[in-house]
Image (spheres, helix red, strand yellow):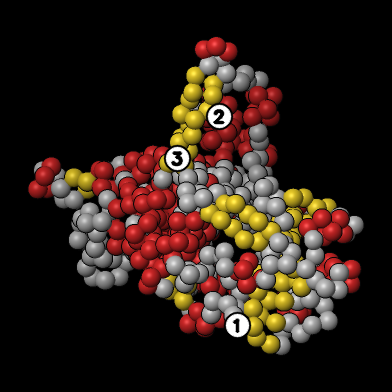
């Protein structure tokens, strides 16, 4: 076991946010208090951390619970005895802290992330607690007991792996993954978040066992019905889709290209989203796409989201998860709509209505994976599907001839992700490399100019000015009844307003009088 003396800047670690540490130390002088897990890892990597987990050794569970209740609200976490959710006085559920006694876990061998027999022991050495953790870089503890020099406890050489940027399972990788199959996706996610290479034995264990991510278990339930009661077989996923969704979304938000590669090479795409793999070897017309097949184009488009050119164009350091998924899935409909001269007699390779087809496919996949569910990282399925369905807007028709109200509909409607649609269009163009080698941004620049001109109509230079007249005013002014005619008049007036030909209420009324006569 490695226990290392090291000068720790407590202020930099942020422990001043947790005054309960001092109070517990005074109440229980024998207590050994440790920060464990991700907070220690992130601190040693000079990364910010939001989640702090504490292990307190040397204090009985009941005594610790009773004392913490004098400092705030304490809740026992399910069946994991010895683990408390502690909310300091004056805080809310978002400021809850995990406080636990040292624990051992015995996995039931199902691969389910809740299928453990947990035993807490206040006298258990912290090393025994660290043994149950997933990766060496997460199995480091930092003792922060008051009156003692902070000490790092590193029984599995996590510090060495941090230095070498290696993600390695604690002990035997297959054992760790068979305890909890979701750890395989956690490995992919951590690799994306901290840019670490997955150690070879750990990586091979993932490849070998990734098919277990879809394991189903059955249980027998007695259905009520008196003398006619029957047994019912209930099936459920060992790793719930909600867990899969959280890991998937966090990985792609952290590093889209690395996530795409890892999910592909590990077999995770094969198990979870096989539809994406049909983009491999799906040809594209070389006069537009010298970069390669649909898979290569999609990967390049994801890479463009972190390029200096993207940051310069949009002043964005971080693409939204909605935009990332829209890019990943924007051409998923191409393989299903592929027509070629050789097989279908087409004039060239075409993908007619691949945008609409792809949006429908994406909705099915997003709903299957429960991507709208994870708290904090879930997506709006319909809004991302809308991006995919309309990603070809810049090549559908003449941009200069497009109505102002149409541009408002796509790029200023609060119900849609207009900013992300523009960014998706840019990434798609940037990854479309013609034989001459330079993407053609002509249509993007035309649309951007028209958007900027519309923004100039507003004092804020961001949102469009409100409509000069609403439907109720139209009915009152012109003695009209509710109906389609009201919508037609509103649209006509809005087009005049956005074109700059009408800017006042009086001019709007005069325009409508002339319009109704004509």
Residue 422 shows in this picture: no
* Label 3 to label 1: alpha-carbon separation: 40 Å
Which residue in the structure is indicated by mark 1? 2
Along the polypeptide, which appears first: circle 3 or circle 1?
A: 1
* Label 2 to label 3: alpha-carbon separation: 55 Å
User: Front-most of 392 and 110?
Assistant: 110
Along the polypeptide, which appears first: circle 2 or circle 3?
A: 3
Which residue in the structure is indicated by mark 2? 487
* Label 2 to label 1: alpha-carbon separation: 74 Å
463 to the left or right of 327: right
| Residue 277: image location, x then y, percent | 30, 53
Which residue in the structure is indicated by mark 3? 217
Along the polypeptide, which appears first: circle 2 or circle 1?
A: 1
Q: Quadrant of residue 152?
A: bottom right
User: Front-most of 508 and 481?
Assistant: 481
Callouts 3 and 1 close, C-beta under 8 Å:
no
Does dot 1 land on a helix, a strand or a loop? Answer: loop
| Residue 180: image location, x then y, percent | 50, 55
Identify the residue at the far top of this view: 227
284 to the left or right of 97: left
Quarter that holds the N terminus:
bottom right
Q: Which mark is residue 115?
A: none
| 5 shown above or below 308 | below
Residue drawn at x 62%, y 61% as measured from the top left: 104
């Amino acid at each position: 076991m490695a226990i290392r003396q090291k000068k720790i800047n407590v202020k930099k670690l942020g422990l001043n946010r947790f005054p309960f540490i001092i109070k517990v130390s005074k109440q229980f002088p024998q207590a050994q208090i440790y920060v464990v897990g991700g907070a220690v890892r992130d601190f040693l990597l000079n990364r910010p951390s939001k989640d702090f987990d504490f292990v307190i050794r040397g204090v009985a569970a009941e005594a610790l619970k009773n004392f913490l209740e004098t400092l705030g609200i304490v809740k026992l976490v399910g069946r994991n005895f010895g683990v408390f959710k502690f909310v300091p006085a004056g805080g809310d559920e978002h400021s809850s802290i995990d406080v636990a006694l040292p624990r051992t876990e015995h996995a039931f061998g199902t691969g389910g992330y809740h299928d453990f027999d947990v035993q807490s022991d206040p006298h258990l050495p912290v090393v025994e607690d660290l043994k149950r953790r997933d990766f060496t870089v997460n199995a480091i503890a930092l003792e922060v007991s008051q009156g003692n020099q902070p000490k790092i406890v590193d029984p599995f050489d996590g510090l060495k792996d941090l230095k070498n940027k290696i993600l390695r399972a604690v002990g035997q990788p297959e054992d760790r993954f068979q305890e909890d199959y979701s750890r395989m996706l956690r490995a992919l996610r951590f690799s994306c978040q901290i840019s670490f290479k997955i150690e070879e034995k750990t990586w091979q264990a993932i490849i070998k066992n990734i098919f277990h991510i879809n394991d189903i278990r059955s249980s027998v339930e007695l259905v009520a019905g008196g003398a006619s009661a029957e047994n019912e077989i209930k099936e459920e996923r060992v790793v719930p889709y909600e867990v899969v969704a959280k890991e998937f979304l966090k990985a792609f938000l952290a590093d889209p290209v690395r996530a795409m590669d890892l999910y592909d090479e590990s077999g995770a795409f094969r198990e979870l989203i096989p539809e994406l793999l049909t983009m491999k070897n799906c040809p594209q017309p070389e006069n537009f796409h010298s970069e390669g097949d649909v898979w290569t184009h999609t990967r390049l488009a994801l890479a463009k989201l972190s390029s200096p050119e993207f940051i310069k164009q949009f002043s964005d350091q971080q693409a939204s998860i909605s935009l990332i998924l829209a890019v990943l899935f924007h051409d998923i409909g191409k393989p299903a709509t592929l027509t070629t001269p050789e097989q279908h007699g087409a004039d060239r390779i075409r993908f007619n209505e691949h945008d609409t087809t792809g949006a429908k496919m994406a909705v099915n996949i997003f709903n299957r994976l429960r991507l709208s569910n994870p708290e904090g990282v879930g997506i709006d399925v319909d809004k991302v599907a809308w991006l995919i369905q309309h990603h070809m807007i810049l090549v559908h028709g003449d941009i200069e001839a497009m109505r102002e109200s149409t541009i408002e509909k796509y790029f200023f409607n609060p119900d849609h992700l207009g900013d992300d649609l523009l960014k998706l269009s840019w990434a798609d163009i940037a990854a479309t490399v013609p034989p001459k080698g330079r993407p053609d941004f002509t249509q993007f620049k035309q649309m951007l100019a028209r958007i900027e001109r519309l923004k100039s109509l507003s004092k804020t230079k961001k949102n469009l000015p409100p409509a000069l007249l609403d439907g109720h005013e139209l009915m009152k002014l012109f003695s009209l009844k509710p109906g389609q005619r009201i919508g037609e008049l509103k649209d006509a007036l809005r087009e005049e307003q956005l074109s700059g030909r009408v800017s006042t209420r009086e001019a709007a009324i005069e325009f409508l009088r002339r319009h109704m006569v004509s």
